[in-house]
Amino acid sequence: MKSIFDFIIKKFVKNYSDVGSQVVRQSYGWLGGIVGFIINTTILILELIVGVFLNSISITADAVHNLTDAVSSLITILSFKLANRPADTKHPFGYGRVEYITSLLFSLSIFFVGYEFLRSSIGRVLQPVSIPFNMGSFLLMLLALPLQIFLNRFTKYIGIAINSSALKASALESFTDILVLSMVTSSLLITRFTTFPVDGYAGIIVSLFILHSGFALCKETLDYILGKAPDKQLVKNIYTQVLSYKYITGVHDLIIHNYGPGRYMVSLHAEVPCDIPVMQIHDVIDKIEKEVGEKLNLYLVIHMDPFKSNSPDVIYLKKRLNKELSIIKGIQSIHDFRVVGDVEAKTLIFDVVVDKSYYNEKSKINILMKIEAGVKNISSQYRCIVTMDKDYY
């Protein structure tokens, strides 16, 4: 099936391999929406014919469900159009978050369908209705099943290809459609052999699954809207790329703002030697911002943190400090290490990155006391000035 998907994509998406391009993403979104609209409309017509002919509430209800799916496909097309509107004065980072809003709408539609299907199924259990079996109707329902499976696989395939939460959400909804359609079709076949209201009981089970899927999808989408931590691979790539440049000896205070899939605003601090001319290091920073930003498809801003890198005393004290802090739970790393004062009464100034689970007042006070004790282990005359940072990723 993958080869069929690739054929369709190559046929209708120009420059299909450049998934980082917003224009290409929009083409993928339109293709997914159009295919979804065509298939859902076809299944809607098939189920309406069967539902009306057999006077089946469950089949007719599922037909209405596919009507909402067809409308959702149109919403997907519209959302990709809105998401790729150019940035303006009101929205300087564009409209990429529209995709997350669309995903939320999908999850709410799943809730609605699950509720309606549950209500109809309970009604069918309480008041059973005899549904006559008809081979022609059964074959029409079977015809709808491979169409639904194809839509699910195709939507998931292109959703992963461009990392679109909206298309992944649509694929999840399509998967519930497969279960519902399978259950309804099986119930139609079983009615040939029994008068037991099996379609009602089966519908209750499927509807509960639909409601669970809607809840899971809603939670995932809200996580993105509320500021979910960035992908670990993206963080790793940023660190690796920045540290590969000359003079950059450390990276910290990384913050990633998500303005929609493929739309990231990134800021970080880079440690550089203090004895390099300012204009020289500034040119390096400019180069990193431009090249890494283009390579990883993000907007990058770097703040320079100069430090004394060639002092044997500073190197020794930092090594000792790292050893003392390595046994303190909750501390991930240190940065911006500086030493001020005379030979005997030195002050060690540095920042520590604290694990999120320890970032509360009680834990921070406890960690600070252990840090001060660790500094005293190096020398009883030393003191420290510590700034605690949170790990945002």
Image (spheres, rainbow, N blue to C red):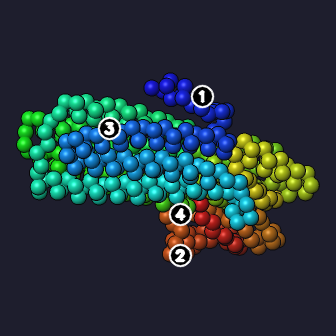
Q: Which residue is drawn at 91% across and 51% down?
A: 280
Query: Residue 312's quadrant in the figure?
Result: bottom right
Q: How far apart are marks 4 and 3 (CA)?
A: 40 Å
Label 2 vs 3, first from the N-terminus: 3
Name the mark nearer the viewer: 1 or 3.
Answer: 3
Mark 2 belongs to which amino acid?
Glu
Decide: marks 1, 3 in contact (CB < 8 A)?
Answer: no
Residue 303: image x %, image y %? 78, 59
- Residue at left 81%, top 44%? 246
Q: Earlier in the sequence, mark 4 or mark 1?
A: 1
**Which residue is pictured at 70% across the width and 72% down the height?**
385
Screen quadrant of the N terminus:
top left
Closest to the observer, 201 or 275? 201
Residue 55 picture location, percent across and down: 19, 46
Discs 2, 3 touching: Cβ within 8 Å: no
SS type, badge 3: helix
Q: Nearer the viewer, residue 362 or 382?
A: 362
**How far, Cα to Cα, is label 4 from label 1?**
36 Å
Q: Position of residue 178 (x, y in %)?
A: 33, 40
Q: Name the residue under label 4.
A: 226
Disc 1 marks a residue whose amino acid type is Lys
**In this view of the protein, can residue 254 be seen by the observer?**
no
Q: Mark 2 points at which residue?
A: 361
- Which numbered dot is residue 362? none
Determine the secondary structure under disc 2: helix
The answer to which image quadrant residue 118 occupies is bottom left
Tag 3: amino acid: Leu
Residue at (43, 43) in percent of width and height: 171
Q: Earlier in the sequence, mark 1 or mark 3?
A: 1
| Residue at image mark 1 | 10
Q: Is residue 131 visible?
A: yes
SS at badge 4 = helix
